[in-house]
Image: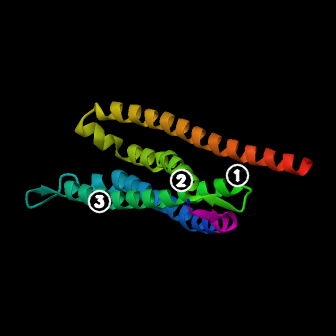
């Protein structure tokens, strides 16, 4: 027998999770992007031409900034997962008017939301690191956007299919309820 979740408890927990995770996501991504902008605009140009031993200070600064920015970007991915799960739970709780929902349905919608919403931090990370990727290999700045477009299309189709299935189930339950009231 599949595990079932109370819709009201699901709604309350998802709202709490969304209130806790969304501001963290915005702050982590914003700090990472601001740090990257400040470093590339001011800090890294200041260290050019200065050496510590045989290592240029700009290279050391670049490694430190890159590590710090990656920490914030990875933290934003973790928070985006929580935001996606909370958003999916909210959608499920709004669509489902019954007292409980199967865990399989919740997991299916969560997966679709996660795949779709992970596009946001990945896109911001790509914008931050695109100049660095161009220095590594110019072809990367062509391949990654193509992959991102494919990701967006696949994620949109998956989300539309999952939400369509959920809305269809909710509509059929509503029609059954109306037929019972009519009799």
- The tag earlier along the polypeptide, 1 or 3, is 3
Predominant SS of the magenta segment: helix
Place of residue 149 in the rendered image (x, y in percent of width and height, measured from the top left): 45, 33
Q: Depth check: 156 or 171 in front? A: 171
> Mark 3 Cα within 10 Å, few/some/many (few <14, many 20+)?
few
Does residue 44 show up magenta in the picture?
no
Helix, strand or loop under label 3? helix
Whole-number angstrom distance, CA of label 2 to CA of label 1:
14 Å
The label on residue 110 is: 2
Q: How is the image coloured?
A: rainbow
Residue sitting at x 41%, y 43%: 127
Which residue carries the number 3 mark? 67
- Left or right: residue 18 versus residue 49 is right
- The single residue placed furthest to the right in the displayed view is 182
93 displayed left or right of 69: right
Q: How many marks?
A: 3
Instruction: Of the two numbered discs 3 and 2 on the same chain, state the one appearing first in sequence.
Output: 3
Magenta extent: 3-12
Q: In the image, which disc is placed on residue 95?
A: 1
């Amino acid at each position: 027998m599949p595990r079932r979740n109370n819709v009201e408890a699901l709604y309350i927990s998802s709202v709490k999770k969304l209130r806790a995770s969304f501001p963290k996501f915005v702050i982590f991504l914003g700090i990472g992007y601001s740090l990257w902008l400040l470093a590339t605009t001011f800090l890294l140009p200041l260290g050019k031409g200065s050496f510590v031993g045989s290592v240029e200070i700009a290279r050391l600064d670049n490694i430190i900034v890159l590590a710090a920015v990656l920490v914030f970007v990875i933290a934003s991915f973790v928070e985006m997962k929580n935001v996606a799960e909370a958003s999916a739970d909210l959608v499920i709780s709004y669509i489902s008017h019954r007292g409980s929902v199967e865990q399989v349905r919740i997991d299916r919608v969560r997966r679709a939301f996660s795949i779709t919403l992970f596009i946001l931090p990945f896109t911001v990370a790509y914008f931050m690191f695109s100049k660095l990727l161009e220095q590594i290999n110019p072809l990367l700045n062509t391949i990654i956007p193509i992959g991102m477009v494919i990701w967006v299309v696949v994620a949109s189709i998956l989300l539309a299919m999952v939400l369509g299935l959920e809305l269809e189930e909710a509509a059929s339950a509503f029609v059954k309820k109306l037929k019972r009231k009519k009799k």
